[in-house]
Structure formats: structure tokens, C-alpha cells
Image: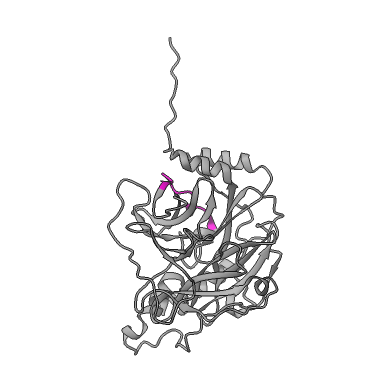
Amino acid sequence: MASYTKKIKITKQLIKSERPKKSVTAKTGLKKKVQKRAKKLANPIILVKLEQNPIISPKVENSWEAWQTFNPGVILLDGKIHFLYRAIGEDGISRLGYAVSSDGFTIDERLPYPVYEHKTGKRAFPPKADQPMADNIFPYYSFLSGGSWGGSEDPRLVRVDEEDVLYMTYTACDNGLRVGLTSIKVDDFLNKKWKWQPPTLISPLDEVHKNWLIFPEKINNKYAILHSIKPTIQVEYIDSLEFDENDYINSFHGGGPRKGCWDKWLRGAGAPPLKTKEGWLLFYHAMDDDWSKYKVGAMLLDLNDPAKILCRSKEPILVPEESYENNGYKPGIVYVSGAVVKDGNLLVYYGGADNYVCVAYTNLEEFLEALKKEIKPKLKLKTLKKK
């Protein structure tokens, strides 16, 4: 397969060209960096990309993560940021790896083995050409989407109301691209005892669903799952996150393009919503007429009724500009899947080109103020001197 061979070549070139890491000084001069970048892009809502990006890259010595490492779920526990990142290796299966950082920028520890895998039975890799396409349609969809033939993709981690459990939603290539849900005790997670609960599939059979998020607090005494942003924000409210085998959430993602705006084609939600004094902060992925590039926007949702959008960014807050965002398995992709607030700063974690884990950051209060203003870029006026 030509695409398969091309993928191997691209990955090897990227790993060889990975630049050496410098010491991280992300916290130094944050305000100046934000102002400089805002002036350059004429956009008041700015995330500053870490100069030392990417912070997680493929490791050729580990066969399970030798090709791609991207789209991390993150959680802030005990002052540290914990990552579960999507990894693809030599067998073409997506698994989840673990890393941890004290400051959110430098990786302190990274395990050499995967910590989660969605078991679906053995598949031919690549699928055999003489098999009917119907037998392989979802593995092929998964391959086109992110580069794997199956497994667990794009995790989102959340802790609800200080419960002693972490919940994880992810895309499972299992009788369709379905949404998987599993959980683990907080203590087990922190002690690296990977005692995950058996997963349940909470989206319908033989349908494609991705990007489902659990809110980190109950809303009106119910768990809330955001499962679509198009044509409207759709949230399911349930009493328990324990699903029976045949229980699932009906979801719809469709409708026409938005007119006269950068986010013409809405793709899906990003990181689990962050609760702020202004509302639920939600990141999302969208495209304009250039379908080859993902861009990221932000919304504020009503705290009591998150189906209601209070405001949204008039321009994208994250666009693929850097080499690590445009050279990889899927050039031009920035995909946010995790975000935390630490020491007053908003840290946003994303996949670059479906190959790397990256981070962008800014001051949370300034970010929210700019987002509320909904300011469009303004043309500078030139003052003419009177003669």
C-alpha cells in the first residue's frame, strides 16, 4: 500500500530531524510573548506555543510507539500534569502511553510500555486486499483519520466532583468507530497500577462517533456528556456513568456550513470543558474552505445550561503554523484533547500533524477577557499630518 509505505518514510524522517531540547523557560516573559504574538496575528485571543515543542515524540526503540505519539488526554493531580497520549507503532494499533510533568512543559517521566489498550481481537495489518471492503470499512476509516487499524484513540480524562475515580472517554475501533468509556481509581492511577474497568461502548453500533466529553462537575445533580457540537451543542444528562451492555446515547452530527466565519465546518469538541467564573470553557475543531487544515476555536457555555453558547472566538486561537504541525502523518492538523489551569495559566495540549504532543499556554484571566469581548481584527488607521 502506497500510503502505508509513505507513512513509514515520513515518520523516519521526522524522528531523524528532531531537534535537541533546550531548557524550558515558558513562564518567563509570558505577557510579552502573548502581546508580541497577538500583534503579529492581529488576534486578541492568543495562545503561545512552547518554543521547545514537541514535548512528546515517537521513540523508535519502543515498537508500540515508534511511529506516532499525539492527541493526549491530561489530568492535574497532586500538582502534576499526567498524560495519556495516543501512540501508534509497528503493528498499526493505537494504544495509550503515560507521561507526567511537574511544570506542564518538561516531561519528568515517561513509561516504556503502554498503559491502556482496547482489545478487539486480531486483525490483519494491513487488512487483506481480497476481503470485501465492508469487512474493513471502519479499520480503513480509522487509518484515514489517524493512521491506525484499530485500538483506542484520542483519550479524554476527567475527574467528576472530586470522586475517587478518573473517567476516560475515547474512540474505539470496535464494530464501528464508537465511543468507549472506562474508569480507574485515582490512587491506582497515581501508583501506576493500571486496573482499568472493562470498557463499555456508549455510542450506537455501526455508526461513527468521536470527541465525546464528560463534564468535570455534575450539572443539576446529573453527570453530563457533551456528544456533539453540530448543528447545536448536544448534552446528555444521566444519573450514572455505569452503562448496561445495550445502553447507548443517540447522537447526531450534521447540518450545513456556518456562513461568514472562520469555523465554517465544525468538526468536534476538544478537551473536556474547564469550569471558569465566566462559564464552561470549551475548545473545538473546525475548518474553513481549506479542508486540509484543522483550526481550533473556543466557546464559553452557560454553567447551568451548557447547550447555550455565551460567546465564541471570532478568529481561531490555534492554527497549524510550525514545522511540527505541518510535517507528519497528517500535515496541517492541530487537535486539542486536553487542557488544565495551573498557577493561573491556561495550558492547552494538542497533537501536531498526528505525530507529536505539543503545548500552548497563556494567562487564563486575560484569555477569558479577550474571549468575552469577541473582538474582530481591526485595521490600523494612518493619521495624515495637516499641511
**Quarter of the image containing the N terminus?**
bottom left
Say which quarter of the image contains residue 62.
Answer: bottom right
Q: Is residue 360 above or below residue 113?
A: above
Q: Is residue 66 visible?
A: no
Q: Residue at x 58, y 69 (%)?
A: 166
- Of helix, strand and loop, which mostly describes the magenta segment? loop
- Point out residue 173 in the picture as x, y percentages from the top left corner: 44, 78
Q: Position of residue 304 (x, y in %)?
A: 45, 53
Q: Nearer the viewer, residue 378 or 17?
A: 378
In reply to whether residue 311 is colored magenta, the answer given is yes
Residue drawn where x is 70% and y is 73% of the image = 191
| Residue 65 appears left or right of 312 | right
Q: Residue furthest front?
A: 221
Judge left or right: residue 297 versus residue 29: left
Foreground: 42 or 46? Answer: 46
Residue situated in front as seen by the camera: 287 or 128: 287
In the rendered structure, which segment of residues is drawn in magenta?
A: 310-323
